[in-house]
Image: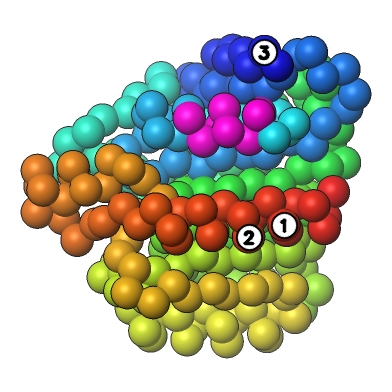
Amino acid sequence: MTIQTQSLTYSVGDATMVSQFVDDPDLKSQKPGILVLPEWWGVDGYIRRRAADLAGLGYAALAVDLYGEGESTDKPDRAEALMNTVLDDMDTGTKRLEMACSILAEQPGVDSSRLAAIGYCLGGAMVLHLARIGAALKAVVSFHGVLDSFYKPQPGEVKAKILVCHGDQDEYVSDESIQTFHDEMKAAEAQYEFVSYPGVLHGFTSPEADEFAEKYGLPLAYDEGTDKKSWQAMTQLFSEVF
């Protein structure tokens, strides 16, 4: 197995995006493609590792630049500012997401009829947005993602199967937003599963979460058991839809 990473540069409006395409070129058959949407930190080492993990499972993965120029940071103030550039202009954010879908579908070795997306924190909100707007994805998976909606889907509009992996002690996701999400998904007649892990905080998939929690006083914590369980839930979903 030879996992290779290639920077893909493309334009969306006035911004130049630099996403990372990761796959095993030795696998000659057409393989499913997975978008990987990052936490508010951007496409950092953690997101690149997740993309490589997916490539190791036989998928092709695109770690998606949401900010432009491939920018990432480990400073919360900068991360918040970058995140808000997306959230404050979701028309542009949506174009960046849709372009990432197109770029992934165009890559050699990717079966454009078998695409999915996973996302973490901010990225979780972004993959749910893709599902809500009816993107041509077989599945989306949100890990400790924000649930708030930027678009209300109509019945039948959500095409992707949805898996939400949530820590029930996540301070960034309110009980009200959870209930609103359930109501929205049911009204849209979406196929979705919401898994809530007891005693688990935001950032439970990221080993770096404990470091950020200590350094910046953020309510984050890595949970190895939940990390493995949620990843297994994702792989099970992918085996069903691909």
Task: Kindly check if marks 2 and 1 are in contact, taking CB atoms under 8 A apart as contact.
Answer: yes
Of the image marks 3 and 1, the number of the one nearer the N terminus: 3
Name the residue that disc number 3 marks. Answer: 2
Cα gap from disc 3 to disc 1, whole angstroms:
24 Å
Residue 99 seen in render = no
Residue at the image point whose x is 73% and y is 58% from the top: 237
Q: Please state which amino acid type lies under the numbered disc 2.
A: Ala
Cα gap from disc 2 to disc 3, whole angstroms:
25 Å
Disc 2 is placed on an element classified as helix
Q: Please state which amino acid type lies under the numbered disc 1.
A: Gln
Name the residue that disc number 2 marks. Answer: 233
Q: Please state which amino acid type lies under the numbered disc 3.
A: Thr
Please, what is the dominant secondary structure of the magenta stretch?
helix
224 and 26: which is toward the camera: 224
70 and 24: which is toward the camera: 24
In screen coordinates, is 153 left or right of 242? left
Crowdedness of circle 1 by 10 Å Cα count: few (<14), some, many (20+)?
few
Task: Kindly check if marks 3 and 1 are in contact, taking CB atoms under 8 A apart as contact.
Answer: no
Residue at the image point whose x is 31% and y is 53% from the top: 222
Q: Is residue 233 above or below residue 235?
A: below
Residue 111 seen in render = yes
